[in-house]
Amino acid sequence: MYERILVATDDSPEADVAVDQAIGLAEAEGASLHALFVVDRRFDRTEAMSEPFVQAGDTALREVEVRAAERGIDVTTTLERGDPAETILTYAESMDADLIVLGGKRPSTAKRFFIGDVTERVARHASTSVLIVRE
């Protein structure tokens, strides 16, 4: 059913659950697995400002590699910079993803109003199936 699965991680508990689900689906379906971490462009103004986020992304992606390898799954990991929702959508298109897997969290109403929820934006604008995994 799925051949190419993209999981987006942000080093949150919700993303950890999504990673587990994506690895399980890749294993069950024999699908390729891609993991993406996006450094939000709002925090990418200077090297000093972005470095902690890049390090967090590298750590999160290494953790995905380890967890996937424990189940015999190869994973392609990528760290990108930009608007998280736009970057996830663009990456999914570029790899022709069958499924995007995201962790679901409920942002405050104020946060959704001002900047929007990444998961919600991806689900609304994706041209492929989106699985939102709740903790």
Image (cartoon, grey):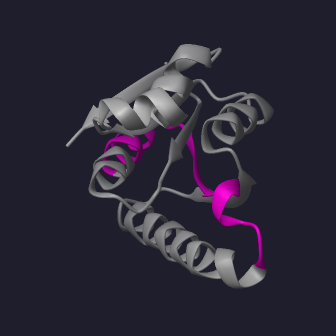
Please, is residue 44 above or below residue 25 in the view? below
Task: Tell me where residue 27 appears, x and y as whole percent.
Answer: 40, 43
Residue 121 in which image quadrant? top right
Please, is residue 35 above or below residue 66 in the view? above
Toward the viewer: 98 or 107?
107
Residue at position x 74%, y 36% in the image: 95
Indicate yes or no whether the magenta region holds residue 30: yes
Residue at position x 47%, y 53% in the image: 9
Task: Tell me the quarter of the image containing the C terminus.
Answer: top left
Task: Tell me where residue 82 appears, x and y as whole percent.
Answer: 73, 50
Relative horizontal placement of residue 75, taking residue 41 as reference (left or right)? left
* Residue found at the far bottom of this picture: 48
* Residue found at the far left of this picture: 135
- Is residue 28 visible in the rendered structure shown here? no
Toward the viewer: 133 or 120?
120
Indicate yes or no whether the magenta region holds residue 36: yes
Task: Tell me where residue 96 appears, x and y as whole percent.
Answer: 73, 28
Toward the viewer: 54 or 5?
54
- Is residue 74 visible in the rendered structure shown here? yes
Q: What stretch is highlighted in magenta?
A: 20-46
Task: Tell me where residue 129 appears, x and y as whole percent.
Answer: 51, 17
Query: What number of labels is visible?
Result: 0
Residue at position x 70%, y 41% in the image: 87
Please, is residue 23 above or below residue 124 in the view? below
